[in-house]
């Protein structure tokens, strides 16, 4: 988590996309006054909601490609090991557009993803695995309306950082 958020101002309301069992949720709750965690899987969402009950975190069941939030609701958005679970590149691009829509001007979007490999394909044999090609992200995120796209690759994965422009 420290490397993923390093150098980024998360602001007062983080949108966590694909919270899963909540591995990163508690850490994010320490970094902002308010966290909204979105999870597609109902059992994961229900269990996480029970765990964070009474904290600064709300859990919503929903889909990253059709976010159930008003425009400009969040100061930042973060997706850790989520994008490859969307069923197509088109749904990933729709998620990028939705994330841009719900971010406030100047808001940051961070993502951490794994690269395509036979090991990751085997590990996802019973779940969706649509790898995100790091080299494609600059064009895809710029097309969605983001600015200042950076992709940093390390062994084990890569980090994406981009901003919603401050201009309307």
Image (tube, rainbow, N blue to C red):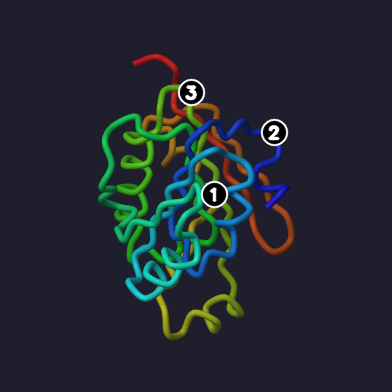
**Which residue position is annotated with label 1?**
111
Per the image, label 2 sits on a secondary structure element best described as loop
Indicate whether 74 appears above or below 23: above
Gap between marks 2 and 1 measured at Cα:
14 Å
Per the image, label 3 sits on a secondary structure element best described as strand
**Which residue position is annotated with label 2?**
7
Residue 70: image quadrant is: top left
164 vs 136, nearest the viewer:
164
How dense is the environment of label 1, judged by Cα within 10 Å: few (below 14), some, or many (20 and up)?
many
Q: Can you name the residue that lies furthest to the front here?
A: 54
Between disc 2 and disc 1, whose residue precedes? 2
Residue drawn at x 30%, y 54% is: 90
Q: Are marks 2 and 3 in contact (CB under 8 Å)?
A: no
Residue drawn at x 49%, y 36% is: 76
Q: Are marks 3 and 1 in contact (CB under 8 Å)?
A: no
55 vs 26, nearest the viewer:
55
User: Is residue 123 rendered to the left or right of residue 164?
Assistant: right
Between disc 2 and disc 3, whose residue precedes? 2
Residue 106's tag is 3
34 vs 129, nearest the viewer:
34
């Amino acid at each position: 988590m420290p490397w993923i958020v390093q150098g980024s101002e998360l602001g007062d309301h983080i949108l966590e996309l694909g919270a899963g069992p909540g591995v990163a949720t508690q850490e994010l709750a320490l970094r902002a006054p308010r966290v909204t965690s979105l999870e597609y899987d109902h059992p994961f969402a229900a269990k996480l909601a029970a765990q964070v009950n009474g904290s600064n975190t709300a859990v919503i069941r929903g889909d990253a490609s059709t976010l159930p939030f008003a425009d400009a609701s969040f100061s930042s958005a973060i997706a850790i090991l989520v994008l490859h679970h969307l069923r197509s590149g088109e749904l990933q691009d729709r998620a990028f557009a939705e994330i841009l829509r719900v971010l406030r001007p100047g808001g940051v979007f961070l993502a951490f993803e794994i690269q395509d490999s036979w090991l990751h394909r085997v590990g996802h044999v019973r779940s969706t695995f649509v790898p995100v090609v790091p080299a494609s992200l600059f064009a895809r995120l710029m097309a969605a309306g983001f600015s200042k796209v950076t992709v940093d690759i390390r062994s084990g994965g890569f980090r994406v950082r981009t901003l919603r422009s401050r201009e309307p």
